[in-house]
Every structure is written in structure tokens, then in C-alpha cells.
Amino acid sequence: MIVILNFGSQFAHLIARRVRDLGVKAEILPFDTNIETIKAINPSGIIFSGGPDSVLRKGSPRPNKDVYTLGVPVLGICYGHQVMAEMLGGEVIRGAHREFGKENLEIQSKSGLFLKLQPNQTVWFSHGDQVQKLPSGFRRSAATTSCKNAAFTDDRRRFYGIQFHPEVTHTKNGNAILKNFLFSICKAKKDWEIKSITEDIISDIKHRVGKEHVVVGISGGVDSLVAATLIHRAIGNHLHAVFVDTGLLRKNEVVEVATYLKKHGFKKLHVIDAQKQFLRALKGITDPEEKRKTIGHLFIKVFESAIKKELRQHSIKYFAQGTIYPDRIESASTSGTASKIKSHHNLTLPEKLGFEILEPIKDLYKDEVRRVGLELNLLRELLWRHPFPGPGLAVRIVGEVTKERVEILREADAIYIEELRKAEEYGKIWQAFAALFPIKVVGVMGDARTYEYVVSLRAVDSVDGMSADWHKIPNDLLEKISSAIVNKVDGVNRVVYDITQKPPATIEYE
């Protein structure tokens, strides 16, 4: 186990992903986690993440000082590198100029982190401060032309600091550096593999749930499908799956998912048609957060009603959710320094129902969830569907949600995805979807002027959704998609393509 203390970095999850990809379990904890919690985990090593703050600012984040007395290796990255130096007696200063982007790193010590690496490396910097004076017992191990202490080490205590980010792909041999830390320095064991994780999750569910009954909400997405299948493998017909049709799902999604589940042994599947209820509840609402809350509260009401009416013959003890690991950052629960981006979309039932929460995939990333799904022999076509928000199409319709707008967006989105699949572009994209703007613009069709909606196409490349770049769809394919949407979807006369990265934008529109 490697513990990652998160100082608010947008890359904290990338660090964990890289560690896991190398076969070692990684757990992200807040930077100020108490020392007893860390001791209880008994990590092989600790990594300090980067962060947006400056160690020169009074009150900036610091880890518990006792973290340096645990006798385990510590690696500080960027802000973590600076905070380690400052806390142990070094000096951090404001740099002469800020460094953002690729830099040439001159390695001065080929042991430790840089074992077997060439003396010059391309690395990625993102900082304004830098370490001017090293703490006692440390020595410089790498430098750049403008950062003399770009890396340092205390070999006796096994403390290491690097000003650059090894977790991003722009650092050419970043994985080799992390690998050296994990295996040469921490002596960590390779014990994180999907097959054993799948078996352990099923075994844990069997042990925890026993002969009790569980209810799970099916959303149509990958996460809830894999979570439900894991539970079903563990307890069989003691699982009750409730699929609420909000009317805000993708085209044919309810029928496709329900048919698949029934075919694969889910005998207690309850599909609830609540389309009219959700449209009525959303009438007149334009604020994104109010939409989410409205949908969430109504979902709870419909779900609760389904439980009381259709499942009253059984005593339900557990409520299962498809929460995954990055959900914790998006809900600002992993680090006190993270900003709240949006309210969590997973369902939270009222305490009065008395359910215990079961979250079988809460420690997994999206790609790990999919790999677990493959271990369970689920259809690849279902597993590799792009992420879909809990509130559904409602947060892809900017402004008020109406029946007309939902129908327009659903058709436009279906055409977009179909064309991507036909061109074999879908599998190259992390997430693609259409969104509808609440404005009408002038256009010309035939000899007549039109006044219709604008559809925006979004497609991004990402690892885990925490950061994303816009996907470069070929121009001829974009043109084909645009023509297909305008020609086939009544109410749309203009299509635009979103080329904004995350950050500064989010992937979804609301």
C-alpha cells in the first residue's frame, strides 16, 4: 500500500492511477490525516502530491510533522517537494520566473529515483516557488537551468523531493521514476490485480451481507451495472434491482439494459416509469444545482415508493450504490483543499429507511471498473459506453428541461454516437455527447428561414475525468455528423463543436 497525501492537486488521482498501474495499491488521503490513521494502514511508502497553494503563504497546507518519523520512504512532488524542504529546515523562495511545461532535467545522481535513467530527461514543471536551500542531510540529485534543486534526496531517511510531475505523460520516463520509488526504495509488493480484486469484492459482499437482502439502483451506466453484477454474483436473488426511467436517459437505454439484465439472471428487476413526474418537477427550473437537487429528491421519492410497494415482502437491509473512487474528489470529500464542483449525483436515501450503504466499487477507477466487468464476462459494448451523468440529459440541456428539448437532444445525441461508431472513432474517445443550448438562431432550409436550436458536440480525451483535452475528430466526420443532425432532427439548424479543455471548463455543461 502506498499512501498519497493530497494537497489539493488536480493530479492526485493520476499519481494513484500510475501507482496502481504498476501493480501496487494506492490510497488518497487528505494532507492533514492524523498520524494514527496512517500508522494503521502501515504503508510501504508515502507520496506528497502537488497543490495550488504556496508554502510561502501563512496557513498553507502542511502534513502532520510526525509523518517524517514513521521510518517509511517519502516522495514529495512539486508542492510536496517544497513543503518537505521547508518543514525539515530548508528554504523555499519565490522563483525568478514561473515554470510551466516541458523542461530539460540534468540528473546529477543516478541512484534512488533516477536509477538506470539517462543523465538528461524531459520532465513537466508547474510551479512558481522553488527550493533555494536544502535541509540538513539532503543533497541535490537533479537540476534545470532555472531550478538548481529540481530534485533532492536524503538517502539515510529515504526522503525524496522532485519539483516536476512524474505522473503526467509529458514527463517521458515518469513511470520509471515512480517504479524506482515503489520497488527499489519502498520494496513494495505487486498485489493489485483485477482478477484478485474481483474475487475479493465478491467474497467481501458474501461475508458482509450473508442472507440479508440488498436493493440497488440501476442507472444504465457502467458503474451501477458492474456494482449490481458483483452483488448478484455474491447473493443471487437476494438482490433487488430498481431501474427508474426518468425520461432523461439515452435513446433505447431502458429497454437495452433491462433486457440484458433479465437475460443474465436478474429475476428481481423492477423498471419504474416516472417520465411524466420528472418533467413536471423540472418545469421552470434553469439553475444547474437546483436541477440536480430536484432530480435527486424526486429519485429518492420514486425509489422509496418502489421499495414500499414492490419489495414489501422482503426485509431490505442494504442499499447499494455504484460510487467509484474519483466521485470522492468531485464531491470534495478527499481533500479539505478541493473545491466543490458539483453535488454528488449518486442517490442518498433518507436515514429513516434505515439502510446500510453498500459500495462495492468505491475504491476503483473507471477503467478498473471496466476491467472488473470483463472479469465478470459482461458485454464489452456495455462496459465501454462513455460516462453518463446521474441526472442524465437534464444537465446536457442548458436552461429549462422540457419534453421537446429532451426529445431533440436524445435524437441528436443518438445520431452523434452512431456516426462516431460507424467511423470507428467512438472507441478512441473517453467521453462524447451532444448538448442543447437554450437559444434559437436563424437559419435557412430550402427557401425558408428557420429559427431553431443550437446543438453543441463535446468529445474529450481523459484518463479518469479529472482533467481532459478536447478530442480531435476529423473535419470530414464532423461535417458528416453536423449534416446528419440538422437533416434528421426537427428543431435544430446549427451544430457547433466544443474545443475547451478541463480545466478551465468542466466536461459536462451543468
Image (cartoon, helix red, strand yellow):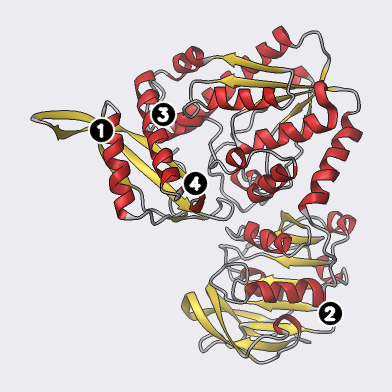
Amino acid at circle 3 = Arg
Marker disc for residue 410: 3
Q: Is residue 203 above or below residue 184?
A: above
**Cβ atoms under marks 4 and 1 closer than 8 Å:** no
| First in sequence: mark 1 vs mark 3 | 3
Amino acid at circle 2 = Arg
Amino acid at circle 1 = Asn
Q: Residues within 10 Å of mark 3 (few under 14, many from 20)?
A: many
Q: What residue does disc 2 label? A: 157
Q: Is residue 85 visible?
A: no
**Cβ atoms under marks 1 and 2 closer than 8 Å:** no
Marker disc for residue 431: 4
**Cβ atoms under marks 1 and 3 closer than 8 Å:** no
Q: Residue at x 33, y 49 (%)?
A: 477
Q: What residue does disc 1 label? A: 487
Residue 55: % across, % down: 61, 69
